[in-house]
Amino acid sequence: MRSRGGFKSSAGLSAVRSCLLLLFIHIGAPLEARRVRGGRAQSRRMQPQQQEQQQAGQQRLEGPESFPLDFTAVESNMDNFMVQVKNLAQSLYPCSAQKLEQNMKLHLLKNSSVTCNDGSPAGYYIKESKGSRRWLLFLEGGWYCFNRQTCSSRYETMRSLMSSSQWPQSRKGTGVLSPEPEENPHWWNANMVFLPYCSSDVWSGAMPKTEHNDYAFMGSLIIKEVVKELLTKGLDKAKVLLLAGSSAGGTGVLLNVDHVAEQLQSAGHGGVQVRGLADSGWFLDNKQYKVTDCLDTISCAPTEAIKRGIRHWGGLVPESCRQAHVGEEWNCFFGYKVYPTLKSPVFVVQWLFDEAQLTANNIHLTGQPVHEGQWRYIQNLGQELRSTLRDVPAMFAPACLSHELITRTNWMDIQVKGTSLPRALHCWDRSLQSSLHLNSSQGLKKPRSPPLRGCPLHLMDSCPWPHCNPSCPTIRDQLTGQEMSVVQFLKHMGFDVQKMAQQQGMEPRKLLGMLSNGS
């Protein structure tokens, strides 16, 4: 067994040496394909026959596709240069047959006392990027349970959200977790860490499994333990740590981003810039459309579910928010109440007509046209969300009926006022870099580079109807599965074009045109 392992190791090293040799040969091959700092290389004068011979040799070396390196890109855009290098390395044979592993690999926590709900070890998936000092930690979502009955039901139907026993050994990153620059232009080369959700406590719990507790709730402790392990893998040398999450994971970002910053500070790594990216976790504690008994996680009002849950989980909230809501810490699970108390910068991504929020409010879009009262409730929800987000300086809020965004493969397609979310996050990153030059004794210093023009951070749709943004995700009829246009969807929802046009003092045809183009 040892000799076979040694053979594989030797073969792997040989392949790496071959790749490196081909890389240097390729870089040094046709001088006319390179530009050297300080001037352009002179093109060699050749006879036609010599040129044909060199081109033939070059094609044999490069294969079907060539990626000449433009070294001037290094000075102005390091990300673009790295994309060129990556494309080149993956195009060369035999590297093309042995591409770098792109998936994140499972690591169970060394500290076995920090567990999932059923006592199985918690863990994380990681894809390291040795040359990067940027780290992205993503918190998975998936609702919650708040008492013995709801947790037992959850364990029977959604066991992977309560146990690590069936987790795969690797995961592919998508959206903001993707290692592909085409899908993830600004974060593709970061160290990626995915934290599976197996605590059912909105990442807040600190309750171990005991004789009196059927399940452990240790979401907050899982994050803390993962950060502790990552410090031994290079996080201690990080420049930026972005704590991201979707749905319950998005709320988990709001609850834990300051905890993570304080943990790094107390461990002597205060130089790491900790930031948050909360996707679809900005829930409202508003009144349900139809008030029902709190029998399960779907029908129970968010406020009542969290009140019961925080006691069941031993839930932890940010200290500044706890002090602002002593005895009513459940308030800290709602974005517009916890956000003003946070010290760390947070970018908020929130659909104005979030499907999970509507479900929690007992609006169920099951293929039947909604009643006028439901339609007004949905419109009011959008208005309420707008009002709570008004003072958030960095956010992306499309007027769409959807849920979760940042891990979608097509997340670049959604736009607000002509700006995509990856672009807005890049603008946010630049603005934070500029603000770092604040010195306590000298005041605000002049930024190293001026802010990007046309680089907005506060992006919120102003149109009032679900899917009035033409870049919203595709809508499908839940009964037939057929795609619907915006106008078809609104009619399906019970939208009365004639009545609305009359109220607006315009022709119905004009209103339909405005709806179609998102005006």
Image (cartoon, rainbow, N blue to C red):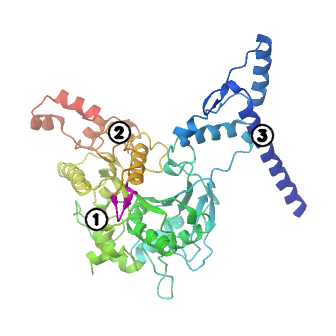
Can residue 80 be seen in this snapshot?
Answer: no
Q: Nearer the viewer, residue 137 or 71?
A: 71
* Residue 453's disc number: 2
Q: Is residue 138 left or right of residue 483?
A: right
As drawn, the residue found furthest toward the top would be 48
Task: Count up the numbered dots.
Answer: 3
**Amino acid found under the numbered disc labelled 1:** Pro
**Of marks 2 and 1, which one's residue comes earlier in the chain?**
1
| Image quadrant containing the C terminus | top left
Quarter of the picture containing the N terminus is bottom right
- Label 1: which residue? 340
Q: Is 282 located above or below residue 82 in the figure? A: below
- Residue 317 is situated, as x and y percent measured from the top left of the image, at 37, 74
Helix, strand or loop at label 2? It is loop
The amino acid at mark 3 is Pro
Cα gap from disc 1 to disc 3, whole angstroms:
54 Å
Pointer 2 local density, CA inside 10 Å: few below 14, some 14–19, many at least 20: few
- Residue range corresponding to the magenta coloring: 435-443
Residue 94: which disc? 3
What residue is at 33 percent from the left and 51 percent from the top?
A: 395
Which residue occupies the foreground of this view, 1 or 84? 84
Q: Distance of mark 2 from mark 1, alpha carbons? A: 28 Å
Q: Which mark is residue 374?
A: none
Residue drawn 45% across the image and 79% down it: 206
Q: Is 68 placed left or right of 390 in the picture?
A: right
Q: Amino acid at mark 2?
A: Arg
What is the crowding at mark 3: few (fewer than 14 residues within 10 Å), some, or many (at least 20)?
some
Q: Note whether residue 98 is visible.
A: yes
Which quadrant of the view contains residue 464?
top left
